[in-house]
Image: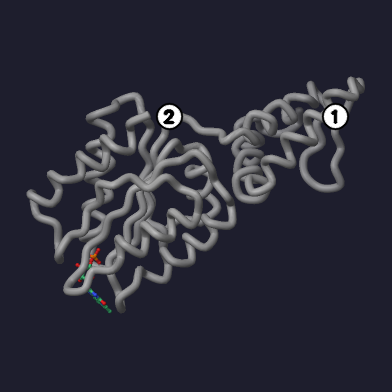
Amino acid sequence: DAADECLLWSEAQKYYANILNPFSPLVKNKIDEIVALNLPIDIIATSHGAIWRDNPLQIVEKYYEWSQDYQEDQITIAYDTMWEGTMKIAHQIASDISRLSPETRVKVFNIAKTDKNDIMTEVFKSKAIAVGSPTVGNNILSSVGGWLEFLTELKFKNKKAAVFGCYGWSGESTKILRSRLIDAGFDVVEPEIRCNWNPDAKVLAGTEEIAAALNER
Ligand SMILES: Cc1cc2nc3c(=O)[nH]c(=O)nc-3n(C[C@H](O)[C@H](O)[C@H](O)COP(=O)(O)O)c2cc1C
């Protein structure tokens, strides 16, 4: 009750998304167990973190909600790029989602420029994500590869994903992104953008299909 409410809740959600999400089944079971004890709870004072004095169960109620495949009407797009082609596709997907579904919140992040924990908090809130990387050395960019390692650890469930990326000659990136996202537990939609060099108007017209697939319930 002494902390700024806005900061408190955003930090609480960031902590849950980045640390506790893989343990969500345990969180839910433990809360069920404690609720069944019917204990009067006056204060929650953990050995580290905030102390909850005013309505201490409010954080327990939030943890309960967050532990059950939490999502909002949001889609998050995360990418990295060398020459900005993959970035153009990311922004076109975002604008198509906004046009098709104006009430859906859309956020776009460059994986190399944004704190990974901040992006994961946005993924946590999302019903779907799109991930983009150009092909480099028959692979994806190492920044995107590292980010996908972390994404896999967090064991997100019940979220869709789409892939996109530019290439020059062999173009393995979208196939690799697809398989890594399936391994991370995402339901990867069929439409993708695999663009030879920089996207032109024809390529960018194809993003609507991705936007529609991610928005479908
Ligand atoms: C260091 C380097 C390695 C690359 N390796 C590959 C490759 O193995 N296969 C391929 O298809 N394209 C490769 N490319 C080409 C890029 O994928 C291509 O330039 C693409 O349009 C870059 O997309 P971007 O504008 O999003 O950075 C490579 C480019 C660079 C600079």
Image coordinates for residue 145, horizontal then vertical, percent? 44, 66
* Residue at left offset 21%, top offset 40%: 209
Marks 1 and 2, the one that precedes in the sequence: 1
> With respect to residue 19, does 28 lie above or below?
above
**Colour mode of the rendering:** one colour
Q: For ligand 1, give the image quadrant.
A: bottom left
Marks 1 and 2: CB-CB under 8 Å? no
Q: Which callout, 1 or 2, points to the residue nearer the camera?
A: 1
> With respect to residue 199, does 108 lie above or below?
above
Q: Residue furthest bottom?
A: 137
Instruction: Look at label 1 and name its amino acid.
Output: Ile
Secondary structure of residue under mark 1 = helix
In the rendered structure, the answer to whether residue 125 lies left or right of residue 41 reads left
In the rendered structure, the answer to whether residue 111 lies left or right of residue 44 reads left
Circle 2 Cα neighbour tier, 10 Å, few/some/many (<14 / 14–19 / ≥20): some
Image coordinates for residue 152, horizontal then vertical, percent? 53, 56
Name the residue beneath numbered marker 2. Answer: 73
Circle 1 Cα neighbour tier, 10 Å, few/some/many (<14 / 14–19 / ≥20): few
* Residue at left offset 56%, top offset 33%: 70
> With respect to residue 214, does 155 lie above or below?
below
Name the residue beneath numbered marker 1. Answer: 34
The quarter in which the N terminus is drawn is top right
Instruction: Look at label 2 and name its amino acid.
Output: Asp
Image coordinates for residue 194, horizontal then vertical, percent? 21, 58
